[in-house]
Amino acid sequence: MNSNATRRAAVAAGCMLLSTIIPINAIAQTATDLVCKGCVSSRDVKNESITSRDIKNGSVFGRDIRDGSIKTEDLSSTVFPASGAAASDFIDDFTTSTFESIVSTSITAPTAGLLLVFGSVSAEDDLSIAGGGTLLGRISIDGVATTNEEFFAEMSTSNADNILGAVMALNIVVPVDPGVHTVAIEAREAGSGSFILGRSISVLFVANGSGVSVPFASKQAGLAANALYTKPQRRPLN
């Protein structure tokens, strides 16, 4: 056997040996038709090479995720950010006739979405000022009122009506763009004066849903009510 024949025989023998070690169908497989269980591990997947766009809806179930495989640090802290503020220092002699912020917080929306806003204000009549108090409240976002109706939220703090204290609750869901937003509870006095006690505001961002287009309600309704306003008429207590 000459050298060429010897070389061809050696190559043929080597190919036969490789075919017994590496199945032909495994050589032909691609990432879209792998049928071997465990042949691809996490070491084979480059960081961030697979995104949510690569995962078909409904293709991953809870049973596919091994217990303890997802840790707190794997979850982004900005997906559903929340923010809040509260104050308990008194605001004495509150007689401001135009809306002003009495508690506020800021929140960063990572994407376009919605802000869920909840707030409350407690107050009582300011006994150092003659007459009864009536407090109006509203929520504002980035300095813009969510409603043009000035009497959208109102509470009497009048001691003459045997009201020792009152609480106003405010809430709204508003669409927002990505970025930083300042959310506040604003108040103004429509009576003679109020003594503001505690107030708080809580804000949560969510990516999906529906909300209220703001500002809502007619400003004229509020202006007309304000022009005719004297004092809330209460039924006498039994």
Image (cartoon, helix red, strand yellow):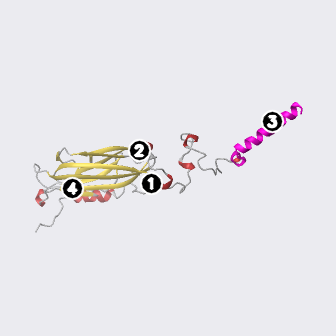
1 and 2 marks in contact (CB < 8 Å)? no
The crowding category of the residue bearing disc 2, from other C-alpha atoms within 10 Å (few below 14, some 14 to 19, many at least 20), is few
Q: Amino acid at mark 1?
A: Asn
Observer-nearest of 208 and 55: 55
Secondary structure under badge 2?
helix
* Residue 36: image tag: none
Q: Nearer the viewer, residue 186 or 49?
A: 49
Instruction: From the image, tell me which residue sits under label 2.
Output: 72
Q: Is residue 25 magenta?
A: yes
| Mark sitting earlier along the chain (2/3) | 3
| Secondary element at tag 4 | strand
Label 2, label 4: how far apart the Cα atoms are: 38 Å
Q: Residue at x 29, y 55 (%)?
A: 170
- In the picture, measured across the screen, residue 30 lies left or right of residue 151, that is right
Give the number of the disc on residue 167. 4
Tell me if residue 15 is in the magenta stretch. Answer: yes
Disc nearer the start of the sequence (1/3): 3
Q: Residue at x 14, y 57 (%)?
A: 158
Q: Identify the mark nearer the N-term, 4 or 1.
A: 4
Q: Say whether disc 1 or disc 2 marks the residue closer to the N-terminus.
A: 2
Q: Quadrant of the N terminus?
A: top right
Residue where numbered disc 3 is placed: 10
Farthest right residue in view: 2
Determine if residue 97 is in view.
no
Q: Mark 4 or 3 closer to N-term?
A: 3
Label 4–label 3 contact, CB within 8 A: no
Magenta range: 1-27
Q: Which residue is mark 1?
A: 208
